[in-house]
Image (tube, helix red, strand yellow):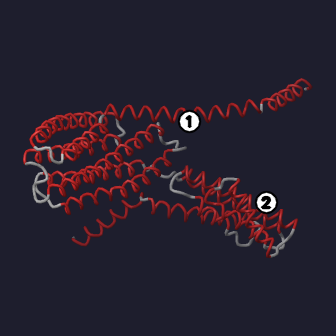
Amino acid sequence: MHDVRKWTAKLRRLTGRRREPVVVQTLRSAAAATIAYVVALRLSPEPAPLTAPLTALLVVQVTFYATLTNGIRRVNSVVAGVLVAIAFSLLVGLTWWSLALLIVASLAVGHLVRVDEYVAEVAISAMLVLGVTTVGFTAWARIVETLIGAVVGMACNLLLPPPVWVDEAGRSIEDLARRVRRLMLRMGEEAAGGIPWQRAAERLHEARRLDHDIVQVDAALRQAEDSLRLNPRVREGLLHRVVMRTGLDTLEICTVVLRVLARSFTDLAKARGARELFPPRIGATVEQLLSEIGDAVVSFAVLVTTHLSENAESAEARLTAELHTAANTRDRLAELLAAEVRKDGENWQLLGAVLTEVNRMIDELDTEHRTRRLLEELDRVSRAQRTKLLGMSRLRERLGVQDRLWRNRAGFGGGSW
């Protein structure tokens, strides 16, 4: 019975991994490369058309948007390289100096056509084509195989649509918020007693390591944003992207403020020496305030990652209540710090800095502040989209003469019938 449960648990863990990016990418890439090779065997004149599976392998990505953009850049790079090779074969042929010129020209063309990470592919395609005796035959085969691989790669994402990675990005944001809360709880517990400055410095190093966590969450969010683009299964994809992006920006500001707060604690511990970091009553208030702000940070993360309107309303109500409680505790802390400074003005700058930093975190998490930033970001994105549409309209206006010519020709042809 124990063995059965053990195998069942392993099977559940294995099943749970089916949506992990590495697993999805591996299975999708292998399937696309195999299908591309089978199709290329029938359509390409080459006996072993390995360019097709190679292209499919490079084109297929975890999201459809990445697959589409990579496919276009990949085809552009191969076509550009083939054209450069044909030009060199007609003019100079293959020598050591022409090879050097070919590489320089191919890399320059790659930057001109903006194929990004496939710039080297332009030179590779040019060298492979130039190095054979039948340039035209090889060039045509390479273009055909590249098109097959790109089409198969994009078709795989259409027939087997990739998952939307919003939930994974949301979990990353919530995990970051919980790590911030745990650090704030530890800092609050130590603020209530006397700690050596070395331990306060350890908390400062922990706060600095949150920057690495921010980078990881940002990568997960970028993947989620790509999975929302050009995805017919997602409604209001722009709103989801903006809400999560602005939410991560707010959490990043909170981590920066927390790092500054940890620095203030470290400097205060050095200044006070063997004495307590704060007087007992102030220390207890600081502990309570950091605990309340930590709870608000987690509630904020839940709010920005919640999709259903009812859950979002409850999360916002909970966040508002927690911020209201934290604001009351902050006001009480301000009174206690003011009384302490009047009694003993030593280290008043550091005490004031502590109050300023906790106040900044409360303001950043405020729901009205979040709504204002969200509207500003939506307005900025809308302006950018209008600018792109305006550019397309101007381009169509410039091509209006040709459009009129075509209309006149169509009208003339229609009248002749």
**Screen quadrant of the C terminus:** top right
Q: Position of residue 169 (x, y in %)?
A: 39, 50
For residue 9, which quarter of the picture?
A: bottom left
User: In this picture, is 218 found above or below 416?
Assistant: below
Q: Position of residue 357 (x, y in %)?
A: 26, 43
Q: Residue furthest top?
A: 415
Residue on which the image places disc 1? 384
User: In this picture, is 46 found above or below 285?
Assistant: below
Q: Residue at horizontal 42%, vertical 43%?
A: 245
Measured in 3D between alpha carbons, the distance from the residue under mark 1 to the one under mark 2, in whole angstroms, is 35 Å
Q: Residue furthest right?
A: 416
Q: Position of residue 175 (x, y in %)?
A: 31, 53
- The amino acid pointed to by label 2 is Leu
Q: Nearer the viewer, mark 1 or mark 2?
A: 1
- The amino acid pointed to by label 1 is Ala
Residue on which the image places disc 2? 83
For residue 40, which quarter of the picture?
A: bottom right
Q: Position of residue 337 (x, y in %)?
A: 14, 40
Q: Residue at horizontal 54%, vertical 51%?
A: 64
Secondary element type, mark 2? helix
For residue 270, which quarter of the picture?
A: bottom left
Q: Is residue 343 left or right of residue 398?
A: left
Depth check, front residue: 106 or 42: 106
Of labels 1 and 2, earlier in sequence is 2
